[in-house]
Amino acid sequence: MSATRAGSDTSDWAADEAVTRLYAAHYRSLVRLAALLLRDAAAAEEVVQDAFVAMHGAWRRLEDPDRALAYLRQSVVNRSRSALRRRTVALRHAPLAAPDVASAEHGALVALEHAEVLAALRTLPVRQREVLVLRYYVDLSEADIAEAIGISRGAVKSHSSRGMAALRTTLERTS
Amino acid sequence: MTHHDNDSLAARLRAALNAEADMVHPSDDGMQNIRSRTARGRAWWQHPAVLAAAAAVVLGLLVGGGAALFGGGDDAGTVAAGPTTSAPGQATSTDSPSPSPTAPATTSSTEPTESASGEQPVYVYFVQDDPDSGPRLYREEHIVAAGPPSAALAVQEMLSEPPIDPDYSSPWPTRTRLTGYQVIGDTARVDLSGFPAVGAQAEAVAVQQLVYTVTANDKAVRRVRLLVDGTAPASGHADWSRPVARAPMVDVQALVWLLAPSQDEVVPPKVRISGYGTAFEGTVSWEVRRVGATGVVADGFAQAGANGEFDEFQDAVTLEPGEYDIRAFESSAEDGRPLHVDSKTFTVR
């Protein structure tokens, strides 16, 4: 529709439209992805909003919803990693404590199980963690994970298998 | 990646990540924040109708209840109605189908339960009388039968269903029905069969309840044109013939507002507390009591927004199984008494 309009605004409109569409379809899942990487929901929203603003600015180069989504994902992973690096001990929101075994014995086995798995995940190096989150939360293909993190497909494979092996070891030790 | 599903570790990881992700609920001002930063000197809602109409097609604002949707403005043309309408050039990536007609609340492919079960969450605002600041809007997430547009479903829910939290209420007459919902440009036209017969302040809050509910579920809508039986509502207080935008949050929205635990929720012993609000120096207090008891079993502080800025606050507490009441509030800077209290009853399993 906007393509029929003449003038320099056309590209702005297309960029705005892309933001609208990608926001509707992916904002929440991107925030959740960032939250899994960052463990901070508020910071996750900032990261994703930054990514959208950057995507809007890069629209002339992207001009394609699929590439824009790939760009957003890449941007969210990179920004989450930088935010993690910057983050000092003083978190804006205090991190959740380690799973409370005593109270979990009252029956919250599922919650305990999740907490254990997530705690083990957090002990992994950042790349391994990113690969596993993108694979098992976002359900990305190897190729898309490689693109999102900016590594080769071979590296995705090895981070994935090493990460899973380390997870298995940690979980066997704690259970 | 189904070949991984046989792997029990993969299944455990997937379940844990999804459970953790499900606890993250983005606030509903994300689009506003992004737009304000990409607008580059022109307010984005001042776009010609053509863009907003395009966005309306993209978001598939299609009316399930029988009302027809049409395009507005000289350039907009006619927007096709029908559940199969999709955006041109829709995404074909692996992780998500296409811009879904149900807006951000429901589109993630990582939440198969929502689409598979034919249900979706909508945001519905209700009113609670805050003794310290008057009637205020509080948002609840309601699960409804799926079907675009979300905003119409949300309005229907607002009119026909009681709030989950018994402290909340709705000033709309109980028999009010939604008879039409159309989006033209950035304006939603909402046709209703009734209008509250209340005082001026309550009426203004009721209209904002409607506007907040519509705009929370449809990011492309900035204003609501309200029609009652086809004409502007007959009000003794104000002229509602013009489209109404959201009033500033600080004027109408709850100042302290608990998101989790939600009313009647059953939660694990590690209870996540979250909410939204603004308070003096950003400090929101919370207190947990056993239902029926007076003694506080746990309390704490969390950081929300300050100086009229709203922000999410978060905290956590571990509790033994049982039934609890939680209250979140701002402590008065003068005498420490609780202001703007929001409360929920929940169960620890």
Image (tube, rainbow, N blue to C red):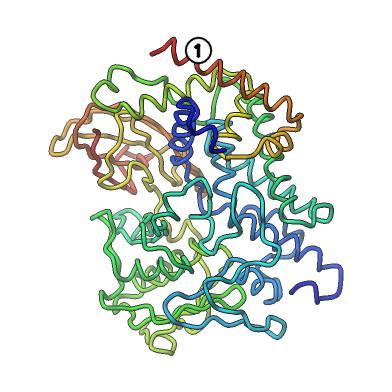
Residue on which the image places disc 1: A169
Tell me if residue B191 comes above or below residue B16 in the rendering.
below
Q: Quadrant of residue B161?
A: bottom left
In front of the other: B278 or B90: B90
Q: Nearer the viewer, residue A167 or A45?
A: A167
Image quarter hosting the C terminus of chain B:
top left
Location of residue A137 with respect to A129 vertically, above or below: below
Residue B316, above or below B179: above
Residue found 67% across the figure and 72% down from its top: B54
Looking at the picture, how far across and down is residue B224, in whole percent?
A: 50, 74
Quadrant into which the N terminus of chain B falls: top right
Visible in this render: residue B331?
yes
User: What residue is shown at x 64% (from left), y 83% (from top)?
Assistant: B78
Q: Is residue A3 left or right of residue A115?
A: right
Q: Mark 1 falls within which chain?
A: A
Task: Kindly identify the amino acid type of the residue bearing the numbered disc 1.
Answer: Thr
Residue B143 pos. (x, y %): 36, 57
Residue lying at the far right in this picture: please name it.
A7
Which quadrant would residue B157 be assigned to in this image? bottom left
Q: Nearer the viewer, residue B6 or B144?
A: B6
Give the residue drawn at x 69%, y 63%.
Answer: A17
Q: Residue at x 56, y 21 (%)?
A: A164
Q: Is residue B166 placed above or below A87 in the rendered structure?
A: below
- Mark 1 is surrounded, within 10 Å at the Cα level, by few (under 14), some (14 to 19) or many (20 or more) other residues, namely few
Position of residue B186 measured from the top left corner of the image (x, y, whole percent): 60, 72
**Which quarter of the figure has residue A175?**
top left
Residue B185: % across, % down = 62, 76
Determine the secondary structure under disc 1: helix
Q: Judge from the rendering whether residue B269 lies leftward or rightward of residue A62; answer left or right.
A: left
